[in-house]
Amino acid sequence: MNTIAKSYSGTISVDSEKIQQGFASPFWKKAEFNRFGITPLLLVLISCVGGAAAAVGVEQQSTFKIAAAAFPTAVGLSMVLGLTPMRVIAATCALAIIVDLLVVFF
């Protein structure tokens, strides 16, 4: 079996600064810079909302509600403690707060 391979003799250039600039907007750069002011606020916020959601789950004797409140809260807290990028921290904390509020109100 014969295989024909054609090669491209031109050069392909990729500007890595433009690629990184798309991912790091000025908002996220400023959030990274202010990490040590934002993370304590998020730690307190998710802990309090998660504790309230767990209390509602205990009051209603629902294992599912306790697990639904505990898992996203623990993931959000571990992202803060693991020093992941602020974009990831913001997404997991927002998800944790939304799930906890759903547990509280429904």
Image (cartoon, rainbow, N blue to C red):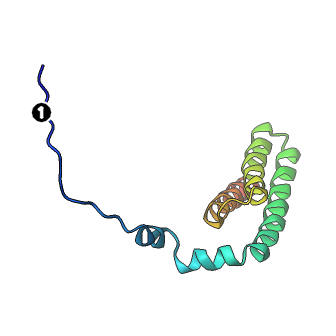
User: Which quadrant, please, contains the N terminus?
Assistant: top left
At a point 68% along the width and 77% down the height, the residue shown is 33
- The total of numbered circles placed on residues is 1
* Among the 4 quarters of the image, the one containing residue 96: bottom right
At a point 82% along the width and 47% down the height, the residue shown is 57
**Residue 32: x %, y % from top left:** 66, 73
Q: Residue furthest front?
A: 9
At a point 77% along the width and 69% down the height, the residue shown is 39
**Residue 15: x %, y % from top left:** 38, 69
* Among the 4 quarters of the image, the one containing residue 40: bottom right
65 vs 46, nearest the viewer = 46
Q: Mark 1, residues whose alpha carbon is within 10 Å: few (<14), some, or many (≥20)?
A: few
**Residue 50: x %, y % from top left:** 80, 56
Is 82 situated above or below 15?
A: above
101 vs 30, nearest the viewer = 30
Is 22 situated above or below 69?
A: below
Q: In this image, 52 relative to 9: left or right?
A: right
Q: Which residue is mark 1?
A: 4
* Among the 4 quarters of the image, the one containing residue 98: bottom right
Q: In this image, 57 relative to 6: left or right?
A: right
Classify mark 1: helix, strand or loop: loop
Q: Residue furthest top?
A: 1
Q: Amino acid at mark 1?
A: Ile
Q: In this image, 105 relative to 21: left or right?
A: right
